[in-house]
Amino acid sequence: MRFSHLLALFATAFPAFSASKFRARNRKRIAARARSEVDEEDGVVRAIIEAGLSDKKKPSAENFKCRLSTLKFGVTQPRNDEEYAKFLGELVAHGRCNQKEACPLHIACRDEVCTLKLISSDNRLTDRLQRDIGSTIARGISSGFLQTLGLMTSSQGTFDVLRDLQHNNFSNIEIFKSGNYFFSSIYEDAADSENFFEALKEYESKSSEGERKEAYADFITKISTIPRFVSYFNVLLTKVMFEKKKEFNPDLMKEADTFLEGLVMEMTRHVEKAHFLTPNQKNTVRYYLNEINVLSGIPENVQDPKLLAEMLNVYREAVKSVSPKEPCALENVASKIGIAHRKLHFFGKYPEMTPFLPVDVPASLYSRTLSRKQNTSGTFMHFHPGFLHVLNSDYSVGMKYGLFGNLIAREIYRGLGLEIENDYHEVMKNKDFQDAKRCYEEYYGGLCDDTEECTKVETTASEGFVDVESARITHALLRRALQQNRELRLDRAVNDSVILPHFNSLPTEHLSLNGAREEEKWFYRALELNFCHEKVVDSKEPGVLPGSSTRANAVVRQMKEFSRTFNCQKEDENRIAEKICSAYPFVHEKPKMLLQAEVEINAASKAALMLAALAAVWIMA
C-alpha cells in the first residue's frame, strides 16, 4: 500500500484539515460551555460586542485615528526623548507592544523589581542584570509603564536593565520611532484574527435562540485568539474547563508527563548506543534530555475556579467604565483588558497561566500548541490544552501517539537537530554526525514534486531530521506501549520502569483481528495529519518547507517499519529509501510477537469501525 493513497483519501475528504482544526474544535466546545455558564451577559464579552457594533458603523478612517486615543503620553507630540520613552512604556502597559520585530521591549516584574529587556539581534534574552536604570530612555519607559498601571510609588518601580543592552541601545530613540507597530490598534488586530467583524455580524443576524447560541460560541471561539483579548479568555475558558472536569477531563494532559519520561529514557538508550560519540559528548546530550522541563495543560496553581473567578472580576470591573457610545470604544475595551492583565500578574499577586512566556506577551492557551523557552537553565516547554479533545476522544492509541505523542517528540528533537545551539563538546563536528547531516541534506535536497521543483536544502534538511527521527522513536514507543498492554492483560510482569500511557484510547482489540498492526496503521495515518495544512499541495515559495504530500512521504520512506506495516513492494513509490539517514543511530530491534486478537470481529463490524473513525475525524475538522 502506498502512503500517497492515504494522503489522497484525507485530502479529498478533509480539504482544509490541519492541526489547528483540532485546537479550534476544543475552543468551540469550551466556548459552548462558557456560553451556558455565563450566558450572554458576561461583562467583558458584552463590552466587546457592544463596542464592536458601535465602532463598525463608523468609517474606517475614523477608527484609524483611535490608535492613540487611549494613550495619555501619545496624544500630543512628545517634546523630548524621555516623553517619547514614557509613551513606549505606556504601550507595553496597554498590551500594544507584542511583536518582536517592531517592538522589541519586554518588562517583567517580580517582588517589586522590574526588568526591562530588549530583544537582541538573535531574538534571545539573557539573564544578566545591572542595578542601574542606565539611560534617560530606560527611565522614561519604566516611568510610563508604572504610571499607566498606577504602580508608581516610592516603594515600587526599582528597575533593572540588562547589562548587554549597551546603554546606547536606549539612547537613540529613532530606533523605536521607526517601529510602525507601536501605532497599531485593536481594529487592525481584529481584522487579522479570524474576521472579528464578520463573526460579530453573524452573531447579531441570528434571531432564533438555538442559532444565536451557536453563533455566540463561534464568536467567542474567534475573539479568544485576538492578541489583545487572549488574557481574559485564557481565564474564562480555563474556569469553565475546571468547573466541568468530568466533561473535559483536564487531568488527562498529565499523561503527557509519563509519555515524556518514557521518551527521554528511549532517547537516552539510543544515545548510549551511539558508538561514535565520546563520553563527554554523550554527557552533553544526556544533560539536555535531563534538563527538559515540561508543563502539560494548565499550571496547578491556577486551576482553582474560585481563584479564576477573582481574576475574571478584575477584568470585568476594568471594562465597566467604557461606554459603547464613546469614540474608539473597542480600542478602550482592549486597553482596559491589557492593563488589567498586567495588574493581575506583575509583582506576583496572581500566578501566570503561561509561565514560560513573558507576562507582557500573553498567548492563547487554546490556539497555540505549545510555548517553548531555552536558556542556560535548560529547556522549558508548555503543552497547551488545545489537544485535550483529541486525548478524550474514542480514537485508537496509535492515532493519539501519531498526533500528540509525535508532537512531544518533535519538540524534544529540535534541541538535538543538525544545528545544535549549545554544542559544548563539539557533537556536530563529529565525522559520523557530519555524515548524517550530509545524508539529510542530500535526501531532502533531492525531493521534487510533480513539476520537478526541488526543496530548498537549507530550510528542509534540519526540519526533516526532526520529522524523521521523532517519528521513528514515537513509533517505537507505541510498539512498546502495545506490548506492555498485552503483558498486563495477561497478568504478566512488565520489566519496564515506565508504563507508557494509552490516553484513554479505544481498546486495541476493538480494531480488528490483528489489533496491534491496525494500531500501527492508525499511527501513520495520524502522523500524516500533522503535516496537513490549508494548502495540501506542495509550496513553491523559496525557503518554504515542502508541502504536505512531499513532507509526509519523505518521512515514511526513511522508516523500515512503514514498509513492513503496509507491505510495500519494490514498485511502490513509498518503499524504503535507498539510503537511510540517522544522526542518532536508531536501535532496530526484532519486533516481538504482535498482539494477537482475542476477540474476533467480522468484516462488517470492522468496516463499521473504520467508517466511524473517519466520521469522527471529519467532525473534528
Image (cartoon, rainbow, N blue to C red):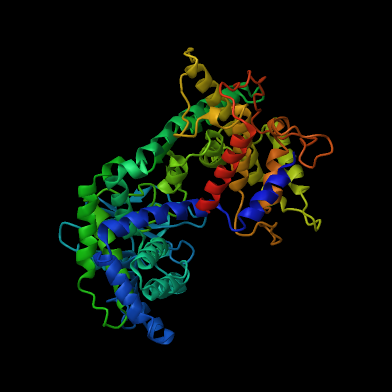
So how many labels did they put on this image? 0
Does the rendering let one see residue 125? yes
State whether residue 41 is above or below residue 608: below
- Residue 583 is drawn in which quadrant? top right
State whether residue 333 is above or below residue 456: below
Does the rendering let one see residue 299? no
Is 262 positioned to the left or the right of 465 in the image? left
In the rendered image, residue 332, in percent from the top left (x then y), is placed at 29, 74
385 or 173, nearer to the observer: 385
97 or 30, nearer to the observer: 30
Residue positioned 55% across, 51% down in the render: 618
In the rendered image, residue 500, in percent from the top left (x then y), is placed at 48, 27
173 or 309, nearer to the observer: 309
- Residue 325 is drawn in which quadrant? bottom left
In the rendered image, residue 250, in percent from the top left (x then y), is placed at 36, 41
Quadrant housing the N terminus = top right
State whether residue 37 is above or below residue 264: below
Is 30 positioned to the left or the right of 373 in the image? left
Residue positioned 31% across, 42% down in the render: 245
User: In the current view of this chain or complex, which residue is farthest to the left?
Assistant: 154
User: In the current view of this chain or complex, which residue is farthest to the right?
Assistant: 571
Is 284 positioned to the left or the right of 190 in the image? right
Residue positioned 23% across, 55% down in the render: 311
In the rendered image, residue 295, in percent from the top left (x then y), is placed at 39, 40
- Residue 467 is drawn in which quadrant? top right
User: In the current view of this chain or complex, which residue is farthest to the top?
Assistant: 492
Is 78 positioned to the left or the right of 444 in the image? left
